[in-house]
Amino acid sequence: MRLVLQLVARLLLIVALCLGAATIWATFDAYRSVDRATAASAQRVAKALQALYWHELLLRSNRMREHLLPVPDWRTIETMKLISPGVCVEFQPAAAFEKPLCGQNQGIGKIPPRWFAAIVPTFLGSHAEVVRPVSPRAAAAGTVVATPDAAAAISLAWEYILNVVDVALLMSAAIALLASLAIAHALAPARAIVTALQRMARGQYRTKLPRFRSMELAMIGEAVGELGARLEEATEQRAALTRRLIEIRDDERRALARELHDEFGQNLSAILAFANTIETAAARESKDNGTAQDARMISQATHRIMASLRDTLKRLRNPLPEELGLEASLVNLVDRWRSQSAAQPTIQLDLKGDLADISGPAATTAYRVAQECLTNALRHSAAREISLHIERRSGEDDALLIRVEDDGGGDAERVARSAGFGLTGIRERVAAAGGSLSILPATRGLSVAATIPLAA
């Protein structure tokens, strides 16, 4: 999962948790606000009745204080204005036929669902009545008792929650959107860093990154640049060392070829001459003692050894591209394999582009890759058809593409993991030339492709 999506998902989870917490707080605050409204109603009505009590006391001083209140004057519209909606207020001690004076109950809030009306009282409890004395200095003046309406309290809480949740949802959506855009903008440079790492994986180590505003990303960019520089330096050193090793190995091959030609060639020629002399002398004596036949067998064995030695010398001596050029040497390579046996599979040679000016290490590497791939395809597979494709890609990407494909089956992964001397050798040569080698499955067999930059 992408990092941006992970951060956005976590942000949405945090927003959802905050929204849930806000909803719970709004429910508690709205439900308990009825208690505050009840206490405020009791306090306001008590103060109004206190003023009325002292007014009646001064005007009617000859009456008993306990008979001063209630009087009809306190049950007025002005008193109703002091009572919050959903709250009922009564005077105690109550006179005969005294009823509570209630605030407006109709149309208070919105009708809540049944589950809300059942859950809220269970978790938050019920509302308690509030008692306030009419006059703290005159206990005989009586008290005011305010009682909240439970249904009205739940309705008010539900309406408050709906209003708060609507605003919270809009704010949450806005925060999530703006934060997502901010996160995406902050992580946008990460794509450039990933692209640079992908280029480094393909061998383009000198990848310049833009300057990032974030200190952390700037440090990562500097580290990537330093890593690319070190990888390029190490790759150049390894390529130079590999080229030197290949040169030393080629020198050893040429020295070995000279030794084989000078020592073994002369000795085999001497053995062949002695065998011919013995065969001629035995034939003159006309004796049927088998000496002539033994000498003839020695001559035949010597001829076979000399033929094998010539093939070995051809592989050890300087490659043909240094003498004939790349195109002619490839044609000669394919013709030589075709002429060895009629039972060999069909070899198709496809040359594209101008190969005339390709020489030096690039031509030698291309020839060795083609030679080794053809040898492996012919000796280690049951291929019926082998194609050798050589293409010169000109332009900015001036490179030579060599691809050998056969229909002999085989496991590409197993071959790619092989540590044989042949594949190891061509890997070293291609790496020394700054190219790349890939072994992939083909339609009915294997495909070995090498890319050699001609500018290297």
Image (spheres, helix red, strand yellow):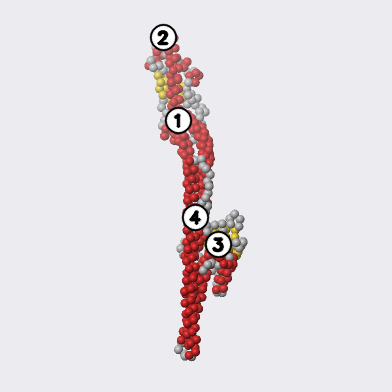
Q: Which class describes the residues within 10 Å of circle 1: few (<14), some (14-19), or many (20+)?
A: some
Q: Earlier in the sequence, mark 4 or mark 1?
A: 1
According to the picture, the residue beneath numbered tag 4 turns out to be 236
Q: Is residue 7 above or below residue 88?
A: below
| Residue at point 56%, 57% (across, down) | 455
Q: Which class describes the residues within 10 Å of circle 3: few (<14), some (14-19), or many (20+)?
A: few
Foreground: disc 3 or disc 2: 3
| Residue at point 47%, 84% (across, down) | 295
| x and y percentages locating residue 127 in the rendered image | 42, 28
Disc 4 to disc 1, how far (Cα)? 72 Å
- Amino acid identity at mark 4: Glu
| Residue at point 49%, 43% (across, down) | 218
According to the picture, the residue beneath numbered tag 2 turns out to be 61
Foreground: disc 3 or disc 1: 3
According to the picture, the residue beneath numbered tag 1 turns out to be 29
**Is residue 403 at all visible to an observer of this figure?**
no
Q: Is residue 191 above or below residue 413?
A: above
Foreground: disc 4 or disc 2: 4
Q: Quadrant of the C terminus?
A: bottom right
Disc 2 to disc 1, how far (Cα)? 46 Å
Foreground: disc 4 or disc 1: 4
Q: Earlier in the sequence, mark 4 or mark 3?
A: 4
Q: Earlier in the sequence, mark 3 or mark 2?
A: 2
Foreground: disc 4 or disc 3: 3
For residue 113, the mark is: none
According to the picture, the residue beneath numbered tag 3 turns out to be 360
| x and y percentages locating residue 82 in the rendered image | 48, 21
- Amino acid identity at mark 3: Gly
